[in-house]
């Protein structure tokens, strides 16, 4: 009987972490049960095989780990390197696209001093500075969030894509608001509403990503306090959503004031809003 069990345990020893731990607990329960005493060794071995957690295939890519959720279902997790690299690239492209909205006054069509013509372009400069600061702060906080993360699962990847999808629309919203910032007939309000809506969507995306990570301690890196991370959800996510909702109302009143409000919100997020460790530690 024991040779069968030893052979099966040696075959499962290639797996690590939760898979091996759960399998050992199951075999211990089987050994101490009456079913082991009444069944033949081959029958017991078949029962173990049917109930043992799935193993990683040898063809699994390096860096992929298999964890168990609360229902003992296999959950594939990977390191954060590729996710961070992809995110950095998307954010870099988005922030670079902002400069395309800054135009040089054409020499042939210049009917006033160049200094005056440049001053008339102040809405484009204001939009550029505000949106550059916003995307820059997104990058800084994205880096801060992933410093807390040791592993990412499929849900984290999709939530991260949702955030990036919103970020890459910021250059469009910036160009729209810069062009219609001083326009009349309600066009300025419409442009400001689009800008605020894009920022609100971005805020929801970032809040969903951070909240999911905070509520799944298995994703956190070693030394990170799960309670402290959960405690930062309101300060990091809920406050931002509330502020961006407020900008929708400001957009209906004044488009320039709406742009100033977004600049102030960016300043708020310049300060550390995430507490990876409890105050006691």
Image (spheres, rainbow, N blue to C red):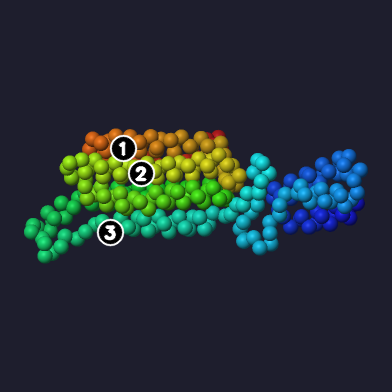
Measure the C-alpha gap from mark 2 to mark 1. Answer: 9 Å
Q: Earlier in the sequence, mark 1 or mark 3?
A: 3
Name which residue lies at 41% across and 51% down.
Answer: 165
**Label 3 CA crowd tier, 10 Å (few <14, some 14–19, many 20+):** few
Find disc 2 in the rendering and name its residue: 199
* Closest to the observer, 64 or 158: 158
Say which of 148 and 95 sits in front. Answer: 95
In the rendered structure, which disc, 2 or 3, sits on the residue that comes first in sequence?
Answer: 3
Q: Is residue 15 left or right of residue 93?
A: right
Residue 265 numbered mark, or none: none
Q: Seen in the image, is 106 located left or right of residue 220?
A: left
Quick one: label 2 or label 1, which is nearer the N terminus?
A: 2
Q: Position of residue 80 (x, y in %)?
A: 54, 54
What is the spatial separation of the Cα atoms under label 1 and label 3, in whole angstroms? 25 Å
Are the residues flagged by discs 2 and 1 in contact, CB closer than 8 Å? yes
* Callout 1: SS: helix
Kindly tell me whether residue 260 is visible in this rendering: no
Mark on residue 100? 3
Q: 6 above or below 224? A: below
- The disc placed on residue 247 is 1
For image coordinates 87% across by 52% down, the residue present is 42
Q: Is residue 113 visible?
A: yes
């Amino acid at each position: 009987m024991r040779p069968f069990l030893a052979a099966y345990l040696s075959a499962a020893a290639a797996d690590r972490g939760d898979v091996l731990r759960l399998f050992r607990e199951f075999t211990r329960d089987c050994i101490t049960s009456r079913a082991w005493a009444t069944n033949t060794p081959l029958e017991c071995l078949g029962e173990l095989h049917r109930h043992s957690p799935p193993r990683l295939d040898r063809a699994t890519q390096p860096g992929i780990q298999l964890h168990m959720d609360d229902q003992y279902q296999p959950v594939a997790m990977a390191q954060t390197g590729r996710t961070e690299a992809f995110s950095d690239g998307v954010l870099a492209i988005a922030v670079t696209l902002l400069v395309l909205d800054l135009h040089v006054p054409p020499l042939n069509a210049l009917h006033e001093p160049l200094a005056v013509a440049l001053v008339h372009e102040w809405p484009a400069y204001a939009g550029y500075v505000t949106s550059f600061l916003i995307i820059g702060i997104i990058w800084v906080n994205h880096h801060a969030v992933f410093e807390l993360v040791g592993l990412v699962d499929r849900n984290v990847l999709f939530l991260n894509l949702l955030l990036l999808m919103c970020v890459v629309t910021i250059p469009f919203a910036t160009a729209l608001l810069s062009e219609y910032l001083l326009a009349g007939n309600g066009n300025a309000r419409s442009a400001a509403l689009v800008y605020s809506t894009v920022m609100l969507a971005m805020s929801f995306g970032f809040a969903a990503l951070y909240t999911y990570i905070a509520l799944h301690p298995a994703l956190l890196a070693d030394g990170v306090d799960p309670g402290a991370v959960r405690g930062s959800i309101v300060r990091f996510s809920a406050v931002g959503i509330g502020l961006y909702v407020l900008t929708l109302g400001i957009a209906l009143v004044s488009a320039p004031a709406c742009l100033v409000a977004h600049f102030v919100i960016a300043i708020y997020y310049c300060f550390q809003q995430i507490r990876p460790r409890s105050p006691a530690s």
